[in-house]
Amino acid sequence: MKTIGIFPGSFDPFTKGHEAVVKKAVQLVDKLYIAMGVNSTKNYIFDLDKRKAHIASLFPSIELITYTNLTVDLCQSLGATHIIRGLRDSKDFEYERSIAHMNQALYPVETIFFLTDPNYAAINASIVREIFKNKGSIEPFVTNSHLLV
């Protein structure tokens, strides 16, 4: 059986922590999609096309897709067997565990959790956005950040 993984997120922006998760995930699944969720009610800091180009520059051989429905519905449409998530701390685990259980109740998909590398544990996209909004450098937290601006 072919394993198909989906790494979902808004990736506003795609941080070095996200990068590390993808590098681990490609070793475990036969095919990986980086799935960028698009929510029309959310105010993104970074333009969608720039975010897509940024991720593609980091992982040109991984298919990047956008979606607007539930992640579990995307899994079903692609025949995904696994959802990939990164965990920084116990709060992330508590939150992600509930979502994983709900997803599994809706569609038979397993969630794989990767612990964040200690070097990236403090990186949080919300904080990175605040640094950017206040004209700080995000390069320490986002590879090739110049592609986003």
Image (tube, rainbow, N blue to C red):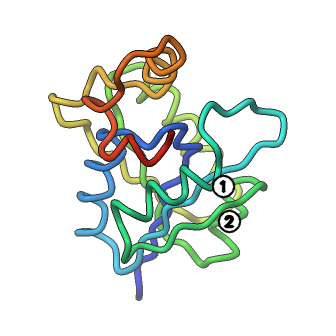
Q: Residue at x 54, y 63 (%)?
A: 109
Are circles 2 and 1 on residues that touch, CB within 8 Å?
Answer: yes
What amino acid is found at the position of numbered circle 1 in the picture?
Answer: Thr
Q: Is residue 91 left or right of residue 88?
A: right
Residue 71, label in figure:
1
Q: What kind of element bears circle 1?
A: helix
Instruction: Please identify the quarter of the rendering in which residue 17 is found.
Output: top left
Residue farthest to the top? Answer: 134
Q: Nearer the viewer, residue 145 or 114?
A: 145
Q: Nearer the viewer, residue 55 or 30?
A: 55
Q: Is residue 63 left or right of residue 104?
A: left
Q: What kind of element bears circle 2?
A: helix
Q: Nearer the viewer, residue 143 or 99?
A: 143
Residue farthest to the bottom? Answer: 1
Residue 74, label in figure:
2
Q: Is residue 34 above or below residue 11?
A: below
Q: Residue at x 66, y 58 (%)?
A: 72
Alpha carbon of mark 2 to alpha carbon of mark 1: how far? 5 Å
Q: Position of residue 52 (x, y in %)?
A: 54, 58
Q: Is residue 5 left or right of residue 41?
A: left
How many residues crowd around disc 2 within 10 Å: few (fewer than 14), some, or many (20 or more)?
some
Q: Residue at x 49, y 43 (%)?
A: 148
Q: Position of residue 12 (x, y in %)?
A: 54, 37
- Image quarter where the N terminus lies is bottom left
What amino acid is found at the position of numbered circle 2 in the picture?
Answer: Leu
